Image: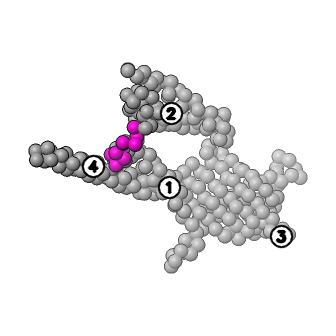
Amino acid sequence: MERRKPKWWRIFLTAYAAGFAFLAAITPDAFSKNGLLIVAIFSLVIALACQGAFHLLWPAWKGIADHRDAEGGWIAAAKSLRHVKWTRVIAVVLTSKLFFLTSCTGGMIVGQLAGNGIESGTRGDHVRPLDKRMSVIAMVPNPKRPGERKVVETTLQDLEKFKKDNPDYSFVLPAGKGELSGNRPMVRTDYSVVATGADKVLVETKYHDDEHHVLGRYAATGKEIEPLYTKTNHDFADFMTGMIFGVPLAFVLALLGYLLEWWQKRRESAVAGNESQRKRA
């Protein structure tokens, strides 16, 4: 029975539409000019990845469907699994391109999640300094609305200059969460404030600049801050960390699959040789 070929263009368009809808829902300012460009590009990547995965999965599904037809339905096909040599199945899975891609990707994700980034503080005999790009949030008078104050940000590196340029500043903010967007696309700072006493707060900031991400914590009073901690991540560095773990893992599993395949063939050859000797005897 000739099986119908998949409509690749439909798969691509469906994956693109689903990816676009998902990214538009989770991306801030998704319908701005820059936001639409970002969503469109990442949706294209998702659609191409889905189509590539479907190319790898289609032969496997075709084999399963052919086995079902040969056995006379799903129930008969399921019963025939009792006689399957699972060592051979495992070897086929481990040596497949799809499993290699999956194990490599999974290993990369685990490797990235296990990475802690660059943290300040003492690590053994080594002391790592605070990241000077840490965001510091303050309130200053709003020149457009006299009598009101607005929330602004600076960095630990530019803190002294900020104090000189804004003499009527305060580092004490209302408790809660907020977000400040930069002048460039994909630049923003998320922050949260917790009151710890009269005119005292504990602030956590998360600065995002495309590939750079800086988490910072500091205690603040009206005019001073006490930096406590920073953790810096870089997307490319995290990607390379994941590669260091994921790619060797994929190769090791593939090598295990080839060893199982070799062992299975050797075992089958030995069994065939023994049967041949018995027949001659």
| 161 lies above or below 77 | below
Number of numbered tags placed on the structure image: 4
Quadrant where the N terminus lies?
A: top left
Determine which residue is flagged by label 2: 47
Q: Residue furthest bottom?
A: 125
Q: Residue furthest front?
A: 281
Marks 4 and 3: CB-CB under 8 Å?
no
Query: Residue 160 is drawn in which quadrant?
Result: bottom right
Q: Is 170 in the magenta?
A: no
Give, as a three-letter code, the residue at label 3.
Answer: Gly
Q: Residue 9's x, y, as percent?
A: 48, 24
Q: Residue 220's x, y, as percent?
A: 76, 67
Callout 2: helix, strand or loop? Answer: helix
Of 116 and 189, nearer the camera is 116
Give, as a three-letter code, the residue at label 1.
Answer: Val
Q: Which of marks 3 and 2 is nearer the N terminus?
A: 2
Q: How far apart are marks 4 and 1 (CA)?
A: 31 Å
Q: Earlier in the sequence, mark 4 or mark 3?
A: 3
Residue 197: numbered disc: 3
Give, as a three-letter code, the residue at label 2.
Answer: Ala
Give, as a three-letter code, the residue at label 4.
Answer: Gln
